[in-house]
Amino acid sequence: MKPTRLSLSLALVCLGAAASWGAVPDTLTLEDLRGHPERWPRTLALRHEVKGPSNRWTLEKGKVVKFVEIQGDKVVLEPSRHLSITVAVADSGLVEEANRRWKALTPAQRAIDHEALIADPSLLPAKIKVMEELHVSNEWGQPQPGDEFDVLGYDADGLLMGAADRARRPIYVDARQTDLIEQARERVLLPEAQRSSRVVAALQGRLVDAQGKPAAPAQLAQAKHFAIYFGAGWCAPCRKFSPEMVGRLGPVAAQEPELLVVFLSNDKTPAAMQAYMQETKMPWPGIGLETWSKVPLLMNYACGTVPQLVVLDRHGTVMVDSMAGGRYVGPQHALQVLLKHVGPGAAK
């Protein structure tokens, strides 16, 4: 599924716009704020009364307004959706307000920036909240402040957010338009092992056994790796690969509490999925097409061709897949790699 890009009104498209990140300062200066929107306050209180042209409108001193960006020695503020004003940095209180918030953060929280989010996927929550209206398209109601969306990932292009239009296509958004930074700063205070898993959140409450009954495998909570198998009973290559996967991986997975295998069925009905799971004696739980196709994170891993085997860590990073260089190569390679890293005597 190819993501679309959201057009941004901000001069900085994502948190990575700065060419150099440098050391994390103890006290912020204006130069420390340039190119670092993750350090910006969301709002500022006006220090002086501001009047519009011909006194057509007045903003009283102390009014809290949205902070947008820094432009040279001025800052851009938005008192309302249809009004934008510029104020001299020295008169805005920007540096003072940024430092007031900065001093409440720990060193680890101050270090959260574009590079940190790319380097450590465990900092990403399962969902983020939109903090301002997002203009996605002209044919779909615009996401409003407070709306929640699934987090699919974060890379050099920024934050990838799922199911944001009618076609359920993911889009890239500016992290600052969401509460991602705030959540990441809370997550960094926890040991990595205690940070909740986006993969677990996507699977929780959706797994069923071969009889269609809800399944709650013990591995779900403790798994460090997930083997996600996309297949279907109507697929001839799947009918060839599934018995091999069950025979080779089944006994090993049963002895690996930190590995959870999940079947994501491409069968058209739950009955067809259950029949195929029973026929192949799949020992792991599954999720029907009607269910997983509405879960953005799971949809994001589907390459569109079955059989597909993708192995993830607990925070959603792809370890090995049935794709190589954008080309489908089949599931056997992923199975071989997985078997080398699980089971007795495997290197871990």
Image (cartoon, grey):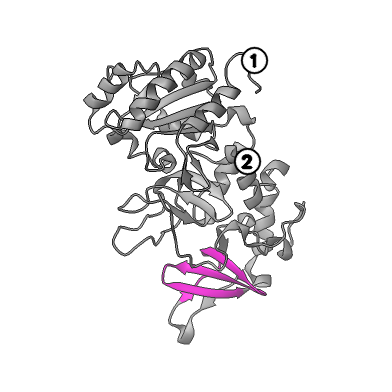
Relative side of 275 to 91, left or right: left
Q: Residue sitting at 49 percent across and 48 percent down?
A: 326
Say if 110 sits above or below 89 in the image.
above
- Inspect this view and state whether residue 209 appears: yes
Which residue shows up at 73% across the image and 43% down it? 107
Q: Give the crowd class for mark 2: few <14, some 14-19, many >=20 residues within 10 Å.
A: some
Q: What stretch is highlighted in magenta?
A: 58-87
Image coordinates for residue 289, horizontal then vertical, percent: 30, 34
Q: In this view, does 26 lie to the left or right of 91?
A: right
Q: Is residue 77 magenta?
A: yes
Q: Count residues near mark 1 (Cα–Cα under 10 Å), then give few for <14, some for 14-19, many for 20+.
A: few
Residue closest to the eye, 329 or 169: 329
Q: What element carries label 1?
A: loop
Quarter holding the C terminus? top right
Question: x, y (%) of residue 269?
Answer: 22, 30
Disc on res. 23: none
The amino acid pointed to by label 2 is: Asp
